[in-house]
């Protein structure tokens, strides 16, 4: 095994190191979610933590790492004798790959042997391997939702349950859960964010001296990992001893009523849903006191606990940026701070760089400004400008719940909530012979396949004999996530009549829908003389919302350029992810005025989508007493459907009437 980079040699990232160490002191804190840009030592720090954890006593030969002093009575490898022979092994750090299957995570029951041989065989998964150690999930936001649910349920209950066709296995699964993610690749759902105890935002330092030190240490480690680790051995030993001492002190730490009032008032002030935040803050503040070598919780512990436990819980909708107003936090702590419950041991414990609590500088998405350009006539003759001289971008109107837009047919893409697909989870629609290991048994089909052979097998009338050739895999149908590619008309005809606010509100509503249905999204805009890919296909719906908010408008309507650009984006994306089907949403009034023969060229570009069997919807933005019906004509050439802004609303009377008429036809 290669020598890990020393934990104490990580430069900066005080909050990250502190959050990891607090979970090492008190696993009840509930794990850490590390959010940040790539190349910020997220994975390095997590892998280095395992070397600081004390060795684990285990029952000899137990695949589930039972403690010989208190073995699990329900252990599948048990029963174990209390106080029986044991051994010590280093604490494990188990990595969960993004592409892992459910069986790899929770373990697998061998259904074939159970039915054909009557043997109850269980192969442990990663949850069993991680028991009493660290379970590390890199890019946790890219993990399938049902795997995240299983993972967090096991972390909350301290046990894993596997049930298949009436056969069940339960084993202990208590581990320190650490997830890392790059928000540019998409966010976790709020209810999943809430299940992580602490969160830390990390960013690369902008200080040249600190960046130099990062490079210097990394090069030294690459030249000789063992020699580099030896230089940091004393610091590593000191932190390891401090973790052990804090664990021993933890049961003696007193959390007084004054600190509890501050915790409750802080969670209420930031309007955090539920009670999990209060509990996590209490456990974190207690662990902070133990880490500092104190037996009493101080206001500074409550403050630091809030900075670690609340930022990811205060989001009111998916597009809110995580974070905490520290001035408001200080005001709340001061208002509810009491002297009647002062800490009996106010002396701070041993300090050090790991106890630092500074927040890394908050950084929001950055958009480059356009260059100045001469005014260009819009579709309605009104001069429009682009770049630095253009009008202030229109603000999006209030988002609303949209009607469901889906891709026809049955796909096999990534799990989601939009279009029909063959998936591992969902309702059973049929059966087939297994391709590889059997995972979901179709019992009725298996019995039906075995029944005609019972007389030849010599067991007619004396029970059913099932052989491997009789086994049938259940075919299930669920929902998949799609690539929703928005093609947005930002020309003068859209902006001149003050419709861009409504258009942005509609697209924002569709983005919210895409977030809830676990889609990838992309954004193509067209105006003036060309089309641009404002956002390549990504899982970060937040990024699409930011780009939409600052969308510039004005100029002519190069509809054909927008469609051709979208077609090229789909071609490239199909090479990258061929299983994910696309839904193209064109938001326009249907006018085409840019370039030579704009109408004919737009028609030819639209027919490329129809020829490629790409599902499409045109959101008709035309308004006014006289309507030309151009968007409807475009939808016909695309081979898709057209809806007005009003019909896009799920609760719209017009949409309801149209749906009823469609069913009647």
Image (cartoon, rainbow, N blue to C red):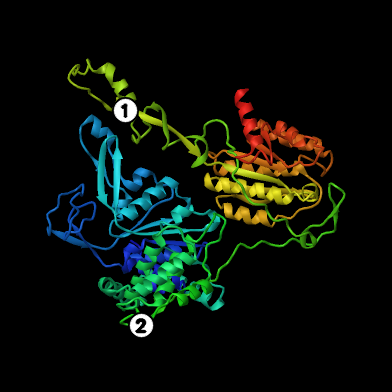
Give the side of residue 655 with respect to residue 412, left or right: right
Instruction: Locate residue 483, reporting x and y percent.
Output: 58, 43
Give the side of residue 452 with respect to residue 502, left or right: left
Q: Please, is residue 73 above or below residue 409 in the view? A: below
Q: Quadrant of residue 246?
A: bottom left
Q: Which residue is mark 2?
A: 348
Instruction: Locate residue 427, reporting x and y percent.
Output: 42, 32
Mark 2 vs mark 1, CA separation in Å: 64 Å
Q: Nearer the viewer, residue 247 or 326?
A: 326
Q: Quadrant of residue 135?
A: bottom left
Q: Which residue is mark 1?
A: 443
Q: Sequence order check: which comes first, mark 2 or mark 1? A: 2
Question: For the point 32% across and 66% down, which residue is it?
Answer: 26
Q: Which mark is nearer the camera, 2 or 1?
A: 2
Give the side of residue 2 with respect to residue 313, left or right: left
Q: Does the image show residue 10?
A: no
Residue count near mark 1 (Cα–Cα under 10 Å), binned few <14, some 14–19, many ≥20: some
Instruction: Locate residue 593, reporting x and y percent.
Output: 82, 43
Circles 2 and 1, Cβ within 8 Å, touching? The answer is: no
Q: Farthest residue in the front direction? A: 340
Question: For the point 62% across and 34% down, which residue is it?
Answer: 656
Question: For the point 30% across and 43% down, which residue is it?
Answer: 162
> What number of labels is visible?
2
Q: Which disc is residue 204 wearing?
A: none
Give the side of residue 651 with respect to residue 87, left or right: right
Question: For the point 56% across and 44% down, which residue is it?
Answer: 576
Q: Please, is residue 114 above or below residue 327 in the view? A: above
- Secondary-structure class at tag 2: loop
């Amino acid at each position: 095994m290669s020598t890990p980079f020393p934990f104490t040699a990580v430069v900066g990232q005080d909050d990250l190191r502190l959050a990891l160490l607090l979970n090492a002191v008190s696993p009840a804190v509930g794990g850490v979610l590390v959010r940040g840009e790539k190349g910020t030592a997220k994975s390095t720090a997590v892998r280095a933590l395992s070397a600081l954890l004390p060795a684990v006593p285990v029952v000899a030969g137990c695949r589930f790492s039972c403690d010989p002093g208190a073995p699990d009575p329900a252990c599948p490898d048990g029963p174990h004798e209390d106080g029986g022979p044991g051994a010590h092994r280093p604490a494990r750090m188990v990595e969960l790959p993004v592409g892992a299957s459910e069986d790899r995570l929770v373990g697998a029951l061998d259904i074939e042997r159970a039915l054909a041989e009557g043997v109850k065989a269980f192969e442990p998964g990663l949850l069993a391997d991680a028991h009493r150690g660290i379970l590390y999930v890199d890019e946790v936001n890219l993990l399938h939702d049902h795997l995240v649910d299983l993972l967090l349920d096991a972390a909350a209950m301290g046990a894993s349950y596997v049930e298949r066709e009436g056969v069940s296995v339960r084993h202990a699964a208590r581990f320190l859960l650490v997830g890392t993610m790059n928000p540019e690749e998409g966010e976790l759902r709020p209810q999943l964010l809430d299940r992580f105890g602490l969160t830390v935002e990390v960013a690369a330092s902008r200080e040249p001296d600190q960046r130099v030190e990062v490079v210097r240490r990394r090069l030294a480690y690459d030249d000789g990992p063992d020699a580099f680790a030896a230089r940091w051995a004393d610091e590593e030993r000191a932190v390891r001893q401090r973790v052990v001492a804090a664990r021993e002190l933890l049961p003696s730490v007193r959390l007084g009523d004054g600190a509890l009032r501050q915790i409750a008032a802080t969670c209420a002030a930031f309007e955090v849903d539920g009670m999990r935040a209060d509990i996590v803050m209490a456990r974190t503040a207690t662990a902070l006191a133990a880490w500092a070598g104190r037996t009493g919780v101080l206001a500074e512990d409550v403050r630091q606990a809030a900075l670690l436990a609340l930022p990811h819980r205060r989001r009111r909708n998916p597009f809110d940026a995580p974070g905490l107003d520290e001035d408001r936090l200080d005001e709340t702590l001061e208002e509810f701070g009491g002297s009647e419950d002062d800490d009996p041991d106010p002396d701070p414990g041993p300090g050090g760089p790991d106890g630092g609590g500074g927040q890394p500088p908050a950084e929001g998405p950055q958009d480059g400004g356009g260059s100045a350009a001469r005014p260009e006539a819009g579709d309605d003759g009104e001069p429009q400008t682009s770049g630095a001289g253009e009008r202030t971008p229109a603000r999006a109107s209030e988002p609303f719940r949209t009607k469901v837009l889906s891709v026809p047919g049955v796909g096999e893409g990534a799990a989601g909530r939009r279009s029909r697909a063959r998936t591992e989870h969902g309702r059973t629609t049929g059966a087939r012979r297994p391709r590889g290991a059997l995972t979901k048994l179709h019992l009725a089909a298996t019995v039906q396949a075995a029944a005609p052979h019972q007389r030849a097998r010599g067991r007619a009338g004396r029970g059913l004999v099932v052989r491997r050739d009789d086994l049938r895999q259940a075919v299930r149908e669920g929902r998949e996530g799609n690539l929703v590619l928005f093609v947005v008309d930002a020309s003068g005809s859209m902006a001149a009549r003050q419709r861009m606010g409504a258009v942005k509100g509609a697209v924002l509503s569709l983005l919210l829908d895409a977030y809830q249905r676990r889609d990838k999204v992309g954004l193509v805009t067209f105006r003036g003389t060309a089309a641009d890919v404002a956002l390549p296909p990504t899982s970060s719906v937040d990024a699409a919302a930011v780009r939409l908010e600052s969308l510039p408008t004005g100029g002519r309507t190069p509809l054909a350029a927008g469609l051709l650009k979208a077609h090229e984006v789909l071609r490239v994306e199909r090479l990258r992810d061929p299983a994910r089907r696309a839904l193209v949403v064109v938001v326009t009034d249907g006018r085409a005025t840019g370039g030579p023969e704009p109408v004919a060229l737009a028609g030819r570009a639209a027919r490329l989508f129809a020829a490629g069997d790409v599902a499409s919807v045109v959101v008709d933005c035309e308004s006014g007493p006289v309507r030309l019906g151009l968007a409807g004509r475009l939808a016909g050439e695309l081979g898709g459907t057209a809806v007005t802004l009003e019909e896009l609303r799920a609760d719209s009377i017009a949409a309801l009437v149209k749906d009823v008429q469609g069913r009647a036809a």
